[in-house]
Image (spheres, coloured by chain):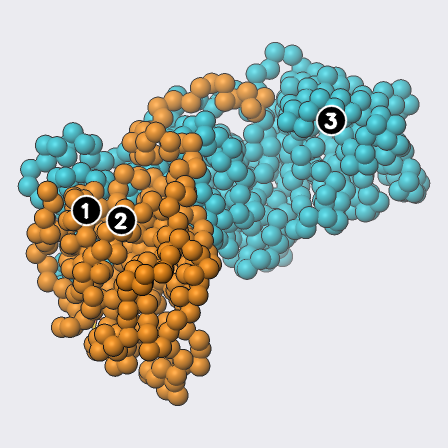
Amino acid sequence: MVEVQDYYYPLKPTWCPGCGNFGIWNAFKSALANQNIEPHEVLVVSGIGCGSKLPDYTRVNSLMTLHGRSLAVATGAQLSNHDLKIILAHGDGDGYSMGGNHLIHACRRNIDVVDIYQNNKIYGLTKGQYSPTSDKGFVTKTTLAGSIEKSVNPIALALAAGATFVSRGFAGELEHLIWLIEEALKHRGYSMIDVFQPCVTFNKVNTYQFYNKRVYKLQEENEYDSSDLGAAFAKSQEWGDRIPIGIFYQKKGEPTYQEHLPVLENKSLVKHGLRDSVPEEIKNEFM
Amino acid sequence: MSELTLIIGGNAGQGLESSGAGFCKALNRGGLHVFSVQDNRSRIRGGHNFYLIKTSTEPIVSWTEPVHLLIALTAETVDIHLGKIVPGGAVVYDPSLEIDEDRIKDREAIPIPLPLYDIAGEAGGSKMMANTAALGAVAGLTNFPIKHLLSVIEDNFRKKGDKVININKKVAESAHDHAASKFGDSFKFNMEQQNGAQRMVMNGNEAISLGALVAGCNFVSAYPMTPGSSIFEWLNKHADEYGIVSKQAEDEIAAVCMSVGAAHVGARALVPTSGGGFSLMVEALGLAGMLEEPIVIVLAQRPGPSTSLATRTEQADLLYAINASQGEFPRIVIAPGTIEECYECGGRALNLAEKYQTPVILMTDQFLATSNRTLDKNNIDLGAIKIDRGALLTDDDLDKIDGEYKRYKFTENGISPRALPGHQNAIFKTTSDEHNELGEIVEAADNRIRMNTKRMKKLETALADMNPPKTHGLEDADITFVCWGSTLAPLTEAMNRLNNETSNTANIIQFIDLFPMPVEKVMPVLKNRKRLITVEGNYTAQLGSLLQMTTGVKIEEHILKFDGRPFSPEYILEHLKKLEKRGRNG
Ligand SMILES: Cc1ncc(C[n+]2csc(CCOP(=O)(O)OP(=O)(O)O)c2C)c(N)n1
Ligand code: SF4
């Protein structure tokens, strides 16, 4: 049995006290332990930002990459060794601004990774500029009169791009978030978890209280059917006094990208070993 | 010896590229040598394109400018190339083009009006088969056995079925008979079959791809960009057969990042591109340097900046490739000059990347990438490339590991034994932030100094694998040309001509290994030369700058070219004269 302790790493997080990343971090470790996944089987790929430091504080294989590029790096790693459990941890700036294009393509390819967005609706590491998920009117040092732009809707975006698992969690709802990450780990294919992550230092609007008052759990609604794409789109538009969290959409049984590749049919690419020779006949192609 | 240069010219969309490459193959099957130049405009339809093939019964050093046989599928082709036609040469064109015969006769060349479109139509083909008819006509005019052309048609159209094969064959045969009977006697240059040869015909991109394949390349990611794309296409074509994951990415940033991820878990990853794509890759190039991941980027140069002459050639990215990225990290830059060297470098780049756990940039250009040349079958030795994975730890090594695994262990030579993620005994971190031996983010100054020094140390260690430049020609000469990459072929021909006129006039120093520059090995080659001239396809003589920077040797004279077209021996000789004139005038 894998214990949460197995994920303990003797480095203390540098996050501000009260930061939503603590909740995500704890949920992450619990979910992995609950799923009996061993640390050496995990590769956490992250970008640059406060949240992306998660793997530095955790006993896992980690690959902390560039701002915005983690999904592309993860895609290469996943297609080369699909025996690893590949999990991404990155912020809303990293994932939805810099990485927006990679997100679209990871969704439609159905790359088999769990993609966690630490969505604090602000730029944390660079100290408080607005982010693509900041709401209209949100005031920061780069939106002095309030943001003019509409915010990105990650749920709708992922649905439109063809993701097979689209969900949202909240760092203040630990048990729910653990469950969500476990469901994502079990899902075969691209799994998005957009997590509300209060940034206690720079975002004074989207606080714990803000979400505590508003969030409700989709899976507690009797009539909600997460296999219904239309219903998922409709729910993705809900924002205001009530904000849904949970699994918006899941499509089971759709082949992952790697399952389409004959090369990867029997085992991971790197488990094949390198070919040791190429037959002379290949020269006929040039004759 | 008999030799002949033919140009088939026409509009984009008339299938010149595939007919040119196909004809190279046919000539090779007939035992002849070939050396081709592909000249395309950056558009899919219309605009003048041409394919030049020099063929000979003897090995060919370089393409040359004089043309013996011009096949014009458009009137523009005649306007552009007539000036290069030799006395006794011929111009083949469809009468519908209404070419003024006297213009051709004025150059002592033979006008050969051949109803290519009608021939194609009568044989049951379409207008598009005019190029097939043209090749048939070439065979007819030059006494080249049509069977070789027919066999290539069979191979190339196999997927399209027997009907298409048979029509194309009929078109070729009919044009052949027509041309042979009506004009065969008047055209005096022949391409007669030679027997017993076992040669291949290959371009630079194919040779790099084959080298990489032999060296175990099993991951290729790319975003299409001329002239790099055909490496991706070739490896993609062989992906299932040889166990390669080939991934077209959403952009070049993703392509190179995918290769970093692939390399991190143990794949042998290669990313072909051109300058624009390389520019997008620069941040991740540094990432690979920082994470110490082995990746190979093939940078097939074309003119810049931005889109420039998208389908043409240049050598203006050398200093960029060496310097691209913020910060300092080791990288290796190599640039083959021949097809054989492309093959070797394709394999060697993957080995160097893994041995030094760092990015390798393999540079070519459009000319070398797309130029088809014959080479002896034995010149490509599939057994010669041995896979070297460097300090890669196997599962057995890791089973026995004692204590904590340190991915970035400080070592004498800067190379840290590399584990792949997935083993119980080696759970490890990697990060683009500065880090300690364990891969933990650390900002301490002393650690930064040690870790940066460890990485940079690899550059010094790699000098052991960096070869001195190659020399061509006699040891002692009045002029020593200095070149890199594709320039070698035309420059060699230019050198030969100079030496044939007056012996010991010229020789060549050719750089393949460009960075890190093995100065101690270079100096004995560079020093005591009477007169050094760099010959490069760029405006600023970048190899000259690099040599000055690394060796202190300042080369004062340059023959440069940046019109997007490859060097020819004629261009080099003409510009050498200009240099000398300038020199005499003081
Ligand atoms: C190419 C590049 N541009 C800019 C930055 C600077 N940068 C670092 S983190 C960041 C944004 C942080 O916001 P987010 O991704 O939402 O993560 P958070 O810190 O809020 O967790 C920026 C702009 C960078 N590292 N790289
Ligand atoms: S700045 Fe915000 S996101 Fe970053 S650690 Fe502090 S609270 Fe967390």
- For the residue pair A89 and B584, the one nearer the viewer reads as A89
Which amino acid, by three-letter code, is at mark 3?
Val
Task: Give me the disc on residue A185.
Answer: 2
| Quarter occupied by residue B201 | top right
> Residue B253 vs residue A172: left or right?
right
What chain does badge 2 belong to?
A: A
Q: Which residue is mark 3?
A: B164
Kind of residue indicated by mark 2: Leu
Query: Which residue is denoted by mark 1 in the rendering?
Result: A35
Identified at 52% across, 38% down, the residue is B233
Q: Which residue is at the front of the view, B62 or B7? A: B7
Q: Which chain, by letter, is orange?
A: A
Q: CA distance from mark 3 to mark 2?
A: 52 Å
**Would you call the spot at circle 1 few (<14 residues within 10 Å), some (14-19), or many (20 or more)?**
some
Question: What amino acid type should be assigned to the residue bearing mark 1?
Answer: Gln
Q: Quadrant of residue B283?
A: bottom left
Q: For residue B13, say whether it is visible.
A: yes
Cα distance between the residues tagged 3 and 1: 58 Å
Q: Residue at x 39, y 49 (%)?
A: A251
Q: Position of residue B397 (x, y in %)?
A: 15, 32
Tag 2 near tag 1, CB within 8 Å: yes
User: How far from the left and from the top, in percent, is residue A284?
Assistant: 55, 20
Q: In x, y percent, where is residue B226? A: 56, 47
Q: Nearer the viewer, mark 3 or mark 2?
A: 2
